[in-house]
Image (cartoon, helix red, strand yellow):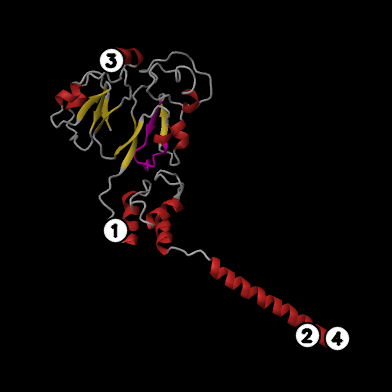
Amino acid sequence: MNTMGIIIAIATVGGVGLLISIFLSVFGNIFKVEVDEKEQAVLSELPGNNCGGCGYAGCANLAEAIAKGEAPVNACPVGGVPVAEKIAAIMGLDAGAGKKMVAYIKCAGTCEKAKTNYDYTGLNDCIMAASVPGAGPKTCDYGCMGMGSCVKACQFGAINIIDGIAVVDKEKCTSCGMCVKTCPNKLIELIPYDSKVVVSCNSKDKGPQVMKACSTGCIGCGICAKNCEVGAITVTDSLAHIDQDKCVGCGVCQEKCPKKVILNA
């Protein structure tokens, strides 16, 4: 190949490369995705667990919603108040007075206290057990089956099965709410970390039925409500409920409860 041919080849390759680079530059400018700096800043403060406890598919989705004003700055239950304050600073908003919440399992029906109808031999999973006749082996249809679906759902190791029922470690719980969504009997709720007392029962059966199923279930007698001087306790569907915002932790309800189902939180 002569010198002129080499020069022509080099010029051709260079020209094609230049055209491609110009094309890519123009194409990139036309179709580039604008990055929301606030969204990226919010995302950097979120814990990155992607647990779904906020109601969004993941942290990126929540960050986008917060940046657009579609979700509150304190929407992340895992990050709690510290993360909410940082995000509020980014968004120029007030984080609000958030309370630390923890999961509580409304059942005291341990192996000794709760009765069973039969020996269960299926998969060791609450959701599966709930689908069989009788909704699990325990006589109480509302209580903890103790098979650990909530344990598997918790990414933070905050739940363990102890003596046949699930128990939450308050110090590890991030209030993500995954256990609440997972429990087939809907007996897990989020309560303030500093709650004083709780009703450790979820049964809505009448008193006689409760006593046949569990030695420590709430019988809906209302004695706790009658003796609460601050009106923090009500009885609905044969089950006592404590309004944690009103409760002062005086302990009278614990003392008066005939079934000793009101326990320290």
Q: Residue furthest bottom?
A: 3
Q: Which residue is mark 1?
A: 93
At label 2, which amino acid type do we have? Ile
Q: Pinpoint residue 189: horizontal percent, then vertical percent.
A: 34, 34
> Looking at the picture, which amino acid does disc 3 mark?
Gly
Q: Earlier in the sequence, mark 1 or mark 2?
A: 2
Distance from the alpha carbon under mark 3 to that under mark 1: 50 Å
Q: Is residue 244 left or right of residue 91?
A: left
Which quarter of the figure is the C terminus placed in? Answer: top left
Q: Is residue 168 magenta?
A: yes
Real-space CA distance between mark 1 and mark 4, rounded to the nearest whole angstrom: 72 Å
- Camera-near label (3 vs 2) is 2
Q: Which residues are magenta?
A: 165-178
Q: Answer left or right for 252 relative to 100.
A: left
Q: Residue furthest right?
A: 1
Q: Pick whichever of labels 3 and 1 is earlier in the sequence.
A: 1
Closer to the chain start, of discs 4 and 2, is 4
Which mark is on residue 7? 2
CA gap between label 1 and label 2 equals 64 Å
Check if residue 18 falls in the magenta segment. no
Residue at the spot x=31%, y=14% of the render? 211
Secondary structure under tag 2 reads helix
N-terminal of the pair, mark 1 or mark 4, is 4
Q: Which residue corresponds to mark 3? A: 207
Which disc number belongs to residue 2?
A: 4
Q: State the separation of the CA atoms marked 3 and 4.
A: 105 Å
Question: Can you give x and y, in whole percent of width and height, for residue 210 in the image?
Answer: 32, 16
